[in-house]
Image: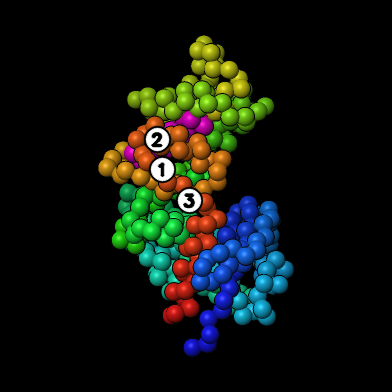
Amino acid sequence: MSQAPRHLVAIDWGTSNFRAFLVDADSGECLDSRRSDAGLRALRGDEFPHYCAAQVNEWRDGGRVPVYLAGMVGSARGWSEAPQLDLPVAASDLARHVVAAPGLDNAWLVPGVKVVEPARVDVMRGEEIQAFGALAAAESDTALCCLPGTHSKWASLEAGYLVDFTTMMTGELYHAVRFHTLPGEPARASDAFDAEGFEQGLRAARHPAGLLHALFEARSRNLYAGLADEQVGSFLSGVMIGSEVDRQRALFPRTAEVLLIGSSALNALYRRAMEAAGFGVREIDSDHATLMGLCALARQHRDE
């Protein structure tokens, strides 16, 4: 077996963003990075290998440094399709099923995961790597992870396996309601955070009539209960995040702590909602989780 490279390139490439990191293969330390808005929507299929090479070739030592790519880049809409594996899945399973990225030597697309059952179908690409990375960062083999975003993911891991996950359209629904409905109309001018508006939304999310009623309360409270125009956006955010978190609290009534993996701005809102629902919260930086997850996968792939 040839000597293992000291470095690797870890890439998280989604619909809207490209993030690449030069990483020490042993420690997981980030040595350099590149970020851009060149997500899947910005490129044609034949442009992926050329764009990737232009961003990372100076790190690659003539191709000897491997590249691992996670996220929607491995979907049918991306560079080339990698499989989505059935649960339960360990990090070693992902490593065994990486797919060579066409047009770029020593570059590998990471599989996603899926749930296909009579009562439920769900898919994930990219967040599974972050969940395994967060598990490593927490020095545990069992956790409930929350990954906020346009399509938030809640992932349950047991004994080192990803055993279940659920997708919530929280971020996308927030944008749709804010910009395309009557209740969201007052929020279109400003997205400044208002703590009281958010707390009202958290409380409204618990109304027995459910999410659809709570969303309309942005309108009725704005008319008759003193919810100011500048509070409506935060109220809607509180309703949606609160509904998401409360549902997970009902599904995991005995879980004491959630690993919260995401950006600092969203993490602060989710922390408020989780603590209100009785969860303890441990925050894991999303970039760090990605790097730890891809480094662990790369080590296992190298040893195959």
- Residue 22 seen in render: yes
**Tag 2 secondary structure:** helix
Q: Is residue 200 above or below residue 20?
A: above
Q: Is residue 250 above or below residue 67?
A: above
Residue at coordinates 60% horizontally, 76% vertically from top-left? 65
* Amino acid residing under circle 1: Val
Indicate the position of residue 206 as horizontal and vertical percent values: 38, 27
Indicate the position of residue 57 as horizontal and vertical percent values: 69, 72
Residue at coordinates 36% horizontally, 34% vertically from top-left? 277
Tell me the quadrant of the picture where the C terminus can be found: bottom left
Of the numbered discs 3 and 2, the one sitting upstream in the chain is 2
Please tell me the numbered disc located at residue 62.
none
- On the picture, is 234 further left or further right than 146? right
Tell me whether circle 2 and circle 1 mark residues in contact (CB < 8 Å): yes
The residue beneath circle 2 is 275
Q: Is residue 259 magenta?
A: no
- On the picture, is 215 further left or further right than 51? left
Indicate the position of residue 260 as horizontal and vertical percent values: 45, 46
The residue beneath circle 3 is 284
Of the numbered discs 2 and 1, the one sitting upstream in the chain is 2
Q: Residue furthest left?
A: 254
Mark 2–mark 1 Cα distance, whole angstroms, equals: 7 Å
Q: Nearer the viewer, residue 226 or 273?
A: 273
Q: Is residue 190 above or below residue 78?
A: above
Residue at coordinates 42% horizontally, 46% vertically from top-left? 282
Q: Main secondary structure of the magenta part?
A: helix
User: The magenta stretch spans which residues?
Assistant: 236-249
Instruction: Say which quarter of the image contains residue 128.
Output: bottom left
Q: Residues within 10 Å of mark 1 (few under 14, many from 20)?
A: some
The residue beneath circle 1 is 281
**Tag 3 secondary structure:** strand
* Amino acid residing under circle 3: Ile
